[in-house]
Image: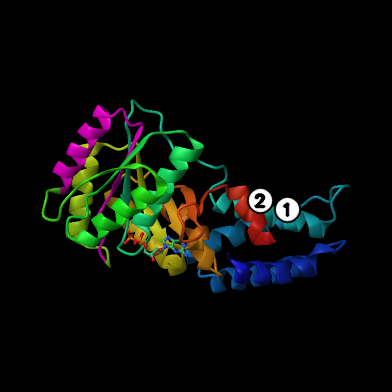
Amino acid sequence: MFENLTSRLSRVLDSIRGQGRLTEEQINAASRELRMALLEADVALPVIKDFIDKVKARALGVEITQSLTPGQEFLRVVQQELTATLGGTAEPLNLRTQPPAIILMAGLQGSGKTTSTGKLALWLKEREKKKVLVVSCDVYRPAAIEQLRIVAGNVGVDWFPSQVGQDPVAIAQDALAQARKQYADVLIVDTAGRTTVDEDMMKEIAALNAALTPIETLFVVDSMTGQDAAKTARAFADVLPLTGVILTKVDGDARGGAALSVRQVTGRPIKFLGVGEKSDRLEVFHPERIANRILG
Ligand code: GDP
């Protein structure tokens, strides 16, 4: 995860770590190197600019404290600004509503929606001790409905049947009625995705969102797509009241551009990371921990 970014940053920061005194030129040079590292990581340009401006301004204004050398102080500034870029503090999943709490999953086809629905269902069941019902509103692909049925079986949560050709809103409402009947705590609604952002998909998911008024509308996005992930998230956030993001396939992402861009580009917090294909490969997102991991 983010190996390239970590090794690139550690090269920049190692050269500065032991410095007893930092000149303006050294700070400028280190900032240029940081900028290159973030460009290589495919971070969105406005995010890079903001990050570098803040690091530089703070580093130039650094007072020499007794406990830290200026080199260490620079590292601390980078660590803090990285944490802020990632969202500052963790924003946990919000289930504070009359049960069943509804979670709507949005995203492009192949982003990992169905896999993440299973992961989230397992996490809610095991960690939060919740009774979960899942339903697929992908009325275009029978394979997607079948995939969710299998995933639900594997993680041991209830699955509500649906069929190709049905109205997605009607399916979701029937599932909600069933969730109430069986006293489920959480209903997770998986939805259809397309390969690109398109108007029909947006209308359909907006209608589902309006009908269900979910407590969480989560955007699932593939980390490997770099700053495009942030752009797609932005397109969805413009249409849907997204409450958070699940960043998937982070296990295969050596660069880290999506993780660093999503929060600032969309204004929405990353809530979970998908770190593998298996159902237990889901991590709650903690900005500070990820910043520390990136810094190695
Ligand atoms: P959907 O079309 O959005 O529902 O996407 P799927 O859930 O079917 O996932 C698409 C592919 O991505 C599948 O092969 C999944 O196994 C894979 N996938 C999903 N999440 C992750 C993840 O966090 N890590 C890895 N390595 N693969 C993932």
| Tag of residue 76 | 1
Quadrant housing the C terminus: bottom right
Residue at image location 15% in from the left, 52% down from the top: 163
Q: Is residue 11 visible?
A: yes
CB under 8 Å between discs 1 and 2: yes
Give the magenta part as a residue range.
168-194
Q: Which amino acid, by three-letter code, is at mark 2?
A: Gln
Query: Would residue 151 be counted in the magenta stretch?
Result: no
| Farthest top residue in view | 98
Query: How many tags in the picture?
Result: 2
Q: Say above or below: 45 vs 79.
A: below
User: SS class of the residue under badge 2?
Assistant: helix
Q: Which amino acid, by three-letter code, is at mark 1?
A: Arg
Quadrant assignment, res 104: top left
Quadrant housing the N terminus: bottom right
Residue 149 appears left or right of 95: left
| Tag of residue 28 | none
Residue at image location 40% in from the left, 67% down from the top: 228
CA gap between label 1 and label 2 equals: 6 Å
- The residue carrying mark 1 has its beta carbon less than 8 Å from ligand 1: no
Q: Position of residue 83 (x, y in %)?
A: 61, 51
| Tag of residue 80 | 2
> According to the image, what is the colour scheme of the structure?
rainbow
Q: Position of residue 200 (x, y in %)?
A: 17, 58
User: SS class of the residue under badge 1?
Assistant: helix
Residue 100 appears left or right of 230: left
Q: Nearer the viewer, residue 180 or 65?
A: 180
